[in-house]
Amino acid sequence: MTEQHPDPAEAIASALARLRGGRGPGPHEHHSHRHAHPHPHAGHGGRGAGPRAWGGDRAGAPAVIRMLEALSTASDPLGVSEIADAIGVDQPRASRLVQQGVDREWVRREADPNDARRTRIALTDEGSRMIRGVRGERRERLGVALQTLTEHERDELARLLTKLADGWPG
């Protein structure tokens, strides 16, 4: 069964997130989520975090954004291997992404209370602000693009993308 969103833009955002293989919102979660083109400077209350956010190096920006999104949707901090699975990279790459996040103070390492040998990764307040800003900017971009469609076309696009995401092999 396809999910029903009161706002076609929400359904489209959710379906796009699910199609990219990330952990998009479930059938009853109605919040803006991942979209196609991350903007690494977004953050700080929805406005750009400025050049200092990436220190001039944006090469890993999309993967770091996917990591932050995975952490923001997780109910608990994740291990590096869980992050790797969630964003579709190998464990060494996930470790490097975690280090980038730690360096930028977007994530922190913490001891696993169930296994002292393991470390879990948690989103910091700064990381939460960063990902909210990215989502806000993506939502704005999607809104602009959707203005080129009629209301009927937006509804149909939402319906079809949701149906495609529902049938996408996991």
Image (cartoon, rainbow, N blue to C red):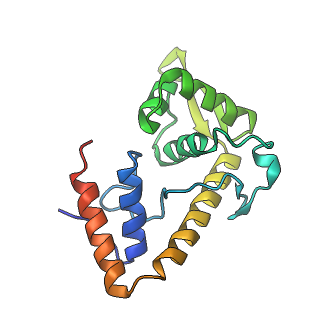
Residue 13 at x, y percent in the picture = 43, 64
Quadrant containing the N terminus is bottom left
x 54%, y 21%: residue: 92
| Direction from residue 169 to residue 36 in the image, left or right | right
x 30%, y 64%: residue: 161
Q: Which image quadrant is residue 119 in?
A: top right
Q: Which image quadrant is residue 169 in?
A: top left
Quadrant containing the C terminus is top left
Can the viewer see residue 109 in this picture? no
x 45%, y 64%: residue: 31
Looking at this view, is 108 or 67 the one in front?
67
x 59%, y 54%: residue: 38
| Direction from residue 77 to residue 132 in the image, left or right | right
Q: Is residue 101 above or below residue 146?
A: above
| Direction from residue 54 to residue 6 in the image, left or right | left
Can the viewer see residue 85 in this picture? yes
Residue furthest left as drawn: 1
Residue furthest top as drawn: 117
Residue 11 at x, y percent in the picture = 36, 68
Looking at this view, is 154 or 79 the one in front?
154
Residue 17 at x, y percent in the picture = 41, 54
Residue 68 at x, y percent in the picture = 57, 44
Q: Which image quadrant is residue 50 in?
A: bottom right
Looking at this view, is 128 or 110 the one in front?
128
Q: Is residue 145 above or below residue 123?
A: below
